[in-house]
C-alpha cells in the first residue's frame, strides 16, 4: 500500500521520472568467489547506468541477494555506499536459506546500514526481499536439481515479521517488504503464508529452463505471460514485481531453448521491452561472466566491464517512436 507514494517520492528525486523501477541483479561475489568491494559495485552500477541502447529511463536500480558484505560476518554490503554515490535505487536482499544464525547476521547488517547511512540510504530503497527462491529449493524440482537447502513457508513468514520489527521507527520504516521466488512457488497454495506476509511478490521466471514444455524461443513470451498471469491470480491483488528473468547468450540447450545472442535479443525485445517503464523489473542479468563465463551465461555484457552490450538493447517500441 505505502509502496505507491514511496515510488512517486523517489521518482521525483531523479531527473528522469520513472513509472517503474528498471534494473539488474547483482551478486556479491565474482565467479572466483572473491567478494565484490565498494569500487567494484560502483563500477558496475556506473557501467549499467550508461548502458548503450538502454530503454527510456536507463538502468539505475540494483537487486541484491544479501545485505552482508562478503568476507565479513555481518558488516553491511558495500553495494550500499556505491549505490548512494551513483544514485542507484536498491531492492535489498536478505539471505534466508542458511539457517537462523546467518539470518541474524543479515538482520544485524541491515540495522548497521540504517545507523551508518540513514536517510541517504533509505531514500534509495525500492523494497526489501526476505529470501530468494527458498521455497523453490524445497520443492520437488529444487530437490531434484540438488538446490537444497531452502526454507519452508513458516520460516520465511517468521523472518519477514522480524524484518518488519527491525525497520519499524527507523528511516527504512516505509520500505515495502516482499519475498522473491520462482513462479511455481507462488502458484503453490501450500506457500500461502508467505503471500500473506508480503507487501509485494517477487517473481522469477525462466522459460529457458521450462524443459517439460515447448520452450523454443518463439514461445518465450507466451510462457512468461502464462507464468506471470498465474502468479497474479494466486496472490490476491498484491503487486507482482519481476525480480528475475532473462535468456542466455551462450551455454547448453535446455529442451527446445537454444542460447544465442539472437535468441537473447529476441527475449529482451518480446519480454523485457513489454515490461520496461510499466512494471518493476530487475533483469537477469548485467554481468555474470567476470572473470569466468558460466554455462549458461545470461549477462548482457561479457567478461569485461563495459557499457557496450553484447546485443542491441534498443526496444522496437522506442525505435518506432516518430519524432
Ligand atoms: C508446495 O509447497 C510446499 C511448501 O513449500 C512444498 O513442500 C511442496 O513440495 C510444494 N509442491 C510443489 C509441487 O512444488
Image (cartoon, rainbow, N blue to C red):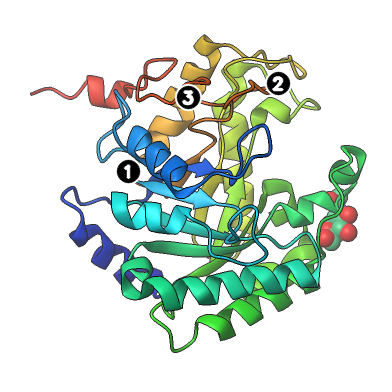
Left or right: residue 161 compared with residue 308:
right
Q: Quadrant of ligand 1?
A: bottom right
Q: Position of residue 233 (x, y in %)?
A: 61, 56
Looking at the rendered image, the disc whose residue lies closer to the viewer, 3 or 1, is: 3
Label 3 to label 1: alpha-carbon separation: 19 Å
Q: Is there CB contact under 8 Å for labels 3 and 1? A: no
Q: Residue at x 41, y 61 (%)?
A: 126
Q: Position of residue 283 (x, y in %)?
A: 49, 38
Give the image quarter of residue 29. Answer: top right
Label 3 to label 2: alpha-carbon separation: 14 Å
Looking at the rendered structure, the number of numbered marks drawn on it comes to 3
Q: Residue at x 59, y 47 (%)?
A: 28
Left or right: residue 239 compared with residue 206:
left
Look at the picture and state if 244 lies above or below 159.
above
Q: Which residue is mark 2?
A: 295
Q: Which residue is mark 1?
A: 277
Q: Position of residue 9 (x, y in %)?
A: 25, 67
Q: Residue at x 60, y 45 (%)?
A: 35
Label 2 to label 1: alpha-carbon separation: 30 Å
Q: Position of residue 192 (x, y in %)?
A: 73, 68
Q: Which residue is mark 3?
A: 300
Q: Residue furthest bottom?
A: 169
Amino acid at each position: 500500500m505505502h509502496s505507491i507514494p514511496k515510488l512517486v517520492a523517489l521518482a521525483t528525486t531523479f531527473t528522469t521520472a520513472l513509472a517503474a523501477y528498471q534494473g539488474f541483479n547483482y551478486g556479491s561475489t565474482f565467479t572466483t568467489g572473491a567478494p565484490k568491494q565498494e569500487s567494484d559495485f560502483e563500477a558496475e552500477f556506473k557501467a549499467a547506468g550508461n548502458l548503450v541502447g538502454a530503454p527510456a529511463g536507463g538502468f539505475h536500480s540494483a537487486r541484491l541477494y544479501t545485505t552482508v558484505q562478503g568476507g565479513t560476518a555481518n558488516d553491511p554490503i558495500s553495494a550500499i555506499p556505491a549505490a548512494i554515490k551513483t544514485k542507484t535505487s536498491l531492492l535489498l536482499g536478505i539471505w534466508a536459506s542458511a539457517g537462523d544464525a546467518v539470518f541474524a547476521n543479515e538482520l544485524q547488517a541491515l540495522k548497521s546500514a540504517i545507523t551508518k547511512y540513514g536517510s541517504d540510504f533509505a531514500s534509495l530503497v525500492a523494497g526489501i526481499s526476505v529470501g530468494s527462491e527458498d521455497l523453490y529449493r524445497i520443492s520437488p524440482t529444487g530437490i531434484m536439481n540438488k538446490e537444497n537447502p531452502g526454507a519452508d513457508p513458516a520460516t520465511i513468514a517468521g523472518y519477514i515479521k522480524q524484518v518488519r520489527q527491525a525497520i519499524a521507527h527507523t528511516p527504512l520504516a516505509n520500505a515495502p517488504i516482499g519475498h522473491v521466488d520462482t513462479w511455481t512457488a507462488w502458484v503453490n497454495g501450500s506457500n500461502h503464508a508467505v503471500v500473506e506476509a508480503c507487501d509485494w511478490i517477487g517473481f522469477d521466471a525462466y522459460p529457458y529452463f521450462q524443459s517439460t514444455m515447448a520452450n523454443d524461443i518463439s514461445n518465450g513470451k507466451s510462457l512468461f505471460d502464462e507464468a506471470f498471469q498465474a502468479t497474479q491470480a494466486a496472490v490476491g491483488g498484491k503487486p507482482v514485481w519481476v525480480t528475475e528473468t532473462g535468456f542466455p547468450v551462450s551455454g547448453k540447450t535446455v529442451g527446445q531453448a537454444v542460447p544465442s545472442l539472437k535468441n537473447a535479443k529476441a527475449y529482451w525485445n518480446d519480454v523485457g521491452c513489454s515490461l520496461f517503464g510499466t512494471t518493476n523489473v530487475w533483469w537477469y542479468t548485467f554481468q555474470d561472466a567476470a572473470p569466468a563465463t558460466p554455462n549458461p551465461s545470461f549477462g548482457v555484457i561479457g567478461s569485461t566491464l563495459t557499457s557496450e552490450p553484447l546485443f542491441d538493447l534498443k526496444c522496437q517500441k522506442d525505435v518506432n517512436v516518430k519524432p
